[in-house]
């Protein structure tokens, strides 16, 4: 059974090339809450601090907060892209990540080569790898573009390939950031259908978003973040408040004709 558990989780981003003492002082004065000095005397941004939470099978969790609050950093940490510098993080279950279109891809390799790399990483058999490639070709619609290096793709083409690869097999834990909302109308109509199936079938969903209508539609729980810390954790209604429905506009009766005279 899938689960995610964090205890005192902390993530730092070192700031290299900050050698001068005066520059350090200015940084500490301007951003004292987030800029610190670690045990190696490096200046670091405290991206996440003292996060404690657990997510069990069946939960649909939204991460909300302003830009820089730590939502995407937490997603990437759960996905294994960033390593914690403190605390503990336990993740049980296969992860599917819709975080960064280029995450896990080799930009110098072709689309087909990246599909094969993904199949090897997942430990798929030759038959399963062929089925994965056929599914990605069909869904992405990239066709002959899969024979050229991914670095030459447009942003929209990268999203198509990344989305098709990430969603071809249903994961236990689905991690999503808002980049998947990009794309042309035809592709997004098909993508939303597939997302609905993935969200339904995944044991756990963790979604970082600014769109409260998506939170109310897909999620059962909300964590609000600020400054790399959790400031609120509860049900959708507890964190966002009850949904306010706009009443339909009242029909306007036509004015009676003015009396002659």
Image (spheres, rainbow, N blue to C red):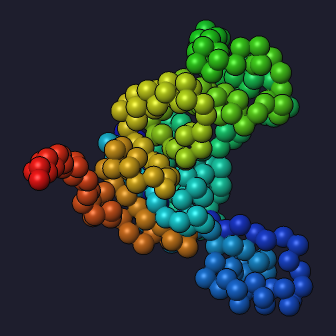
Q: Is residue 178 above or below residue 183?
A: below
Where in the figure is residue 170, as x and y percent of width and height?
A: 47, 28
Q: Is residue 167 above or below residue 253?
A: above
Q: Choose top left, top right, bottom left or bottom right for residue 97.
A: top right
Where in the figure is residue 115, as x and y percent of width and height?
A: 69, 22
Q: Is residue 205 left or right of residue 43?
A: left
Q: Is residue 206 left or right of residue 19?
A: left
Q: Residue at x 40, y 31 (%)?
A: 196
Where in the figure is residue 184, as x and y percent of width and height?
A: 60, 30
Where in the figure is residue 160, as x and y percent of width and height?
A: 64, 28
**Camera-side residue of 123 and 23:** 23
Q: Choose top left, top right, bottom left or bottom right for residue 198.
A: top left
Q: Choose top left, top right, bottom left or bottom right for residue 24.
A: bottom right
**Camera-side residue of 207 and 43:** 207
Res 132 seen here: no
Q: How many marks?
A: 0
Q: Is residue 217 above or below residue 230?
A: above
Q: Residue at x 38, y 69 (%)?
A: 232
Q: Is residue 155 above or below residue 207?
A: above
Residue that protrudes farthest toward the front in the picture: 261
Q: Is residue 43 left or right of residue 135?
A: right
Quadrant assignment for the N terminus? top left
Q: Residue at x 54, y 59 (%)?
A: 71
Q: Residue at x 78, y 30 (%)?
A: 153
Res 240 seen here: yes
């Amino acid at each position: 059974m899938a689960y995610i558990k964090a205890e005192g989780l902390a993530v730092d981003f070192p700031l290299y090339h900050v050698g001068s003492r005066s520059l350090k002082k200015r940084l500490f004065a301007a951003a004292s809450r987030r800029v610190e000095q670690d045990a190696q005397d490096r200046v670091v941004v405290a991206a996440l601090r003292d996060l404690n939470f657990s997510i069990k099978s069946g939960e649909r969790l939204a991460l909300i907060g302003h830009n820089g609050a730590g939502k995407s950093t937490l997603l990437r940490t759960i996905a294994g892209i960033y390593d914690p510098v403190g605390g503990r993080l336990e993740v049980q279950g296969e992860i599917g990540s819709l975080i960064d279109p280029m995450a896990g891809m080799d930009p110098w390799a072709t689309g087909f080569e990246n599909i094969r790399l993904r199949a090897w990483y997942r430990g798929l058999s030759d038959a399963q790898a062929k089925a994965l490639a056929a599914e990605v070709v069909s869904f992405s619609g990239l066709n002959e573009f899969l024979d050229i290096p991914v670095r030459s793709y447009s942003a929209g083409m990268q999203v198509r390939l990344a989305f098709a690869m990430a969603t071809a097999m249903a994961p236990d834990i689905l991690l999503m950031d808002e980049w998947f909302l990009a794309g042309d109308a035809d592709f997004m109509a098909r993508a939303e259908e597939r997302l609905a199936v993935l969200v339904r079938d995944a044991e756990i969903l963790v979604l970082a978003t600014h769109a409260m209508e998506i939170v109310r539609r897909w999620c059962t729980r909300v964590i609000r973040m600020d400054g790399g810390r959790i400031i609120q954790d509860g049900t959708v209604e507890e964190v966002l408040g009850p949904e306010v429905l706009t009443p339909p506009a009242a029909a306007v009766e036509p004015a009676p004709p003015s009396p002659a005279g």
